[in-house]
Amino acid sequence: MKKLVFGAIIIGFASLGYSQISDCDCGKNTIHLTGVEVSPVDHNYLNNVGGGAVSLKVLDLQNQASRYNIQKSKVYDFNSDKRKTYVVSFKGENGRILATYNQSGKIIRASEYYSDLILPPAVRNAAFKEHPDWTLYGTKYSVNFDGKNAKKKYQLQMKKNNEKENLNYNTDGRRLN
């Protein structure tokens, strides 16, 4: 019995030692994925328009716009000195983006409009703190990107009895106007 236990221990250690030996050239192999296309991402655009507690529907559409490759589009002209920009429209379930791309595929302007989104907590809390006992009737979210900065605004319509009020907030819940 001692020989059997001792033999099992030796075999166990031997198999552990063998598993540490590597014959592979790890990191040097190239994997080709069929049906997968990697697109460059416009990080300047995403860093400016993204962030904060925005809806996943907004983030999805912004990601589509940032990954769009204008140079693979049918309207792109490699040899044109006249055509400097390309305008592309993206439509989602609750919004749209009108993005202007330059020749190299970077977004230089974008206008985004969304409606009926779930509000970020900061905006929702600020609105109901200012207007307790009111009902949220409608929401709109807009983003205007000029190539360097993004201006973001939530527009809320609130109702109480026969009264209506339109409110504007930034993404941090600070009242605009």
Image: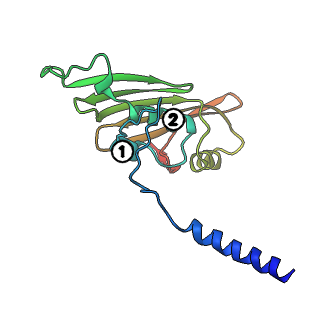
Left or right relative to 144: residue 86: left
Q: Secondary structure at mark 1?
A: helix
What's under tag 1, amino acid-wise? His
Q: Nearer the viewer, residue 70 or 137?
A: 70
Measuring 22% from the left and 29% from the top, which residue is drawn there?
A: 103
Structural crowding at the residue carrying mark 2, measured as other residues with C-alpha within 10 Å and reported as few (<14), some (14–19) or many (≥20): few
Left or right relative to 1: residue 99: left
Q: Secondary structure at mark 2?
A: helix
Q: Are marks 2 and 1 in contact (CB under 8 Å)?
A: no
Q: Position of residue 110 (x, y in %)?
A: 35, 32
Measuring 36% from the left and 45% from the top, which residue is drawn there?
A: 43
Q: Nearer the viewer, residue 146 or 46?
A: 46
Measuring 74% from the left and 77% from the top, which residue is drawn there?
A: 9
Left or right relative to 15: residue 103: left
Measuring 69% from the left and 45% from the top, which residue is drawn there?
A: 132
**Residue highlighted by disc 2:** 60
Q: CA distance from mark 2 to mark 1?
A: 14 Å
Left or right relative to 65: residue 108: left
Q: Nearer the viewer, residue 128 or 148?
A: 148
| On screen, residue 38 above or below 2 | above
Q: Nearer the viewer, residue 130 or 148?
A: 148
Q: Position of residue 16 (x, y in %)?
A: 63, 70
The furthest residue to the top: 74
For residue 43, the mark is: 1
